[in-house]
């Protein structure tokens, strides 16, 4: 896996990341740091990527278990250290999983498996942050 990040000097503190799979992701800094607030902050993209990674796992695990899942939303909240490096110290992920006759135990197991075995991003962030999860089930 690879990614090339280019600073867009004319934008202040804007950056464009070109992924190895051929996609583009824009990032920008806060105005107080020279950015123009035109795109997510780099650390926001870390949280977004982690949420996407674990949501992917949860959906895949449920589908492989032949469960009728039709939606998965993850709201990620975090706290960071007050001084540099401002690593994440706490991350909470709240899942809202939608489907027909989804067993609570299957959803709980899928979330647990993601965070203990499959989600590379959350497992890495777990080295500096306390990661907690919760979930709601919504009948489709």
Image (spheres, grey):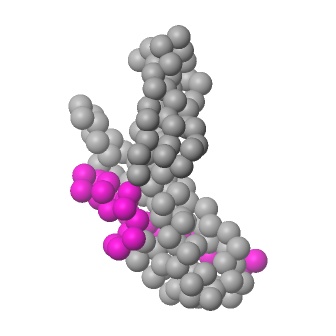
Q: Is residue 89 above or below residue 29?
A: below
Query: At 43% from the left edge and 35% from the top edge, which residue is drawn?
Result: 4
Q: Residue furthest right?
A: 140
Task: Judge left or right: residue 87 versus residue 57.
Answer: left
Q: Please tell me whether residue 99 belongs to the stretch shown in magenta.
A: no
Number of labels in the image equals 0
Task: Judge left or right: residue 79 versus residue 52.
Answer: left
The reply to whether residue 35 is visible in this rendering is no
Residue 101 found in image quarter: bottom right
Estimate the x, y position of residue 80 in percent, counting from the top left: 33, 41
Which residue is at the front of the view, 65 or 85?
65
Estimate the x, y position of residue 21 in percent, counting from the top left: 53, 49
Estimate the x, y position of residue 100 in percent, counting from the top left: 72, 84
Estimate the x, y position of residue 48 in percent, counting from the top left: 50, 49
Residue 55 found in image quarter: bottom right
Task: Judge left or right: residue 128 versus residue 58.
Answer: left
Query: At 23% from the left edge and 31% from the top edge, which residue is drawn?
Result: 84
Query: At 41% from the left edge and 51% from the top edge, which residue is drawn?
Result: 1
User: Which quadrant would the C terminus be assigned to in this image?
Assistant: bottom right
Q: Please tell me whether residue 132 belongs to the stretch shown in magenta.
A: yes
Query: At 50% from the left edge and 70% from the top edge, which residue is drawn?
Result: 57
Task: Judge left or right: residue 121 versus residue 55.
Answer: left
Range of residues picked out in magenta: 115-140
The reply to whether residue 117 is visible in this rendering is yes
Q: Is residue 100 above or below residue 90?
A: below
Which residue is at the front of the view, 24 or 36?
24
């Amino acid at each position: 896996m690879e990614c090339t990040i280019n600073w867009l000097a004319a934008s202040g503190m804007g950056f464009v990341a070109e992924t190895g799979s051929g996609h583009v992701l824009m990032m920008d800094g806060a105005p107080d740091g020279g950015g123009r607030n035109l795109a997510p902050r780099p650390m926001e993209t870390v949280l977004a990527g982690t949420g996407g990674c674990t949501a992917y796992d949860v959906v895949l695990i449920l589908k492989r278990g032949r469960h009728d899942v039709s939606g998965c939303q993850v709201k990620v909240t975090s706290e960071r250290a007050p001084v540099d490096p401002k690593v994440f110290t706490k991350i909470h992920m709240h899942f809202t999983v939608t489907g027909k006759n989804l067993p609570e135990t299957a959803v709980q197991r899928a979330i647990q498996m993601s965070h203990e075995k499959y989600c590379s991003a959350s497992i890495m962030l777990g080295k500096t942050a306390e990661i907690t999860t919760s979930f709601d089930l919504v009948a489709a």
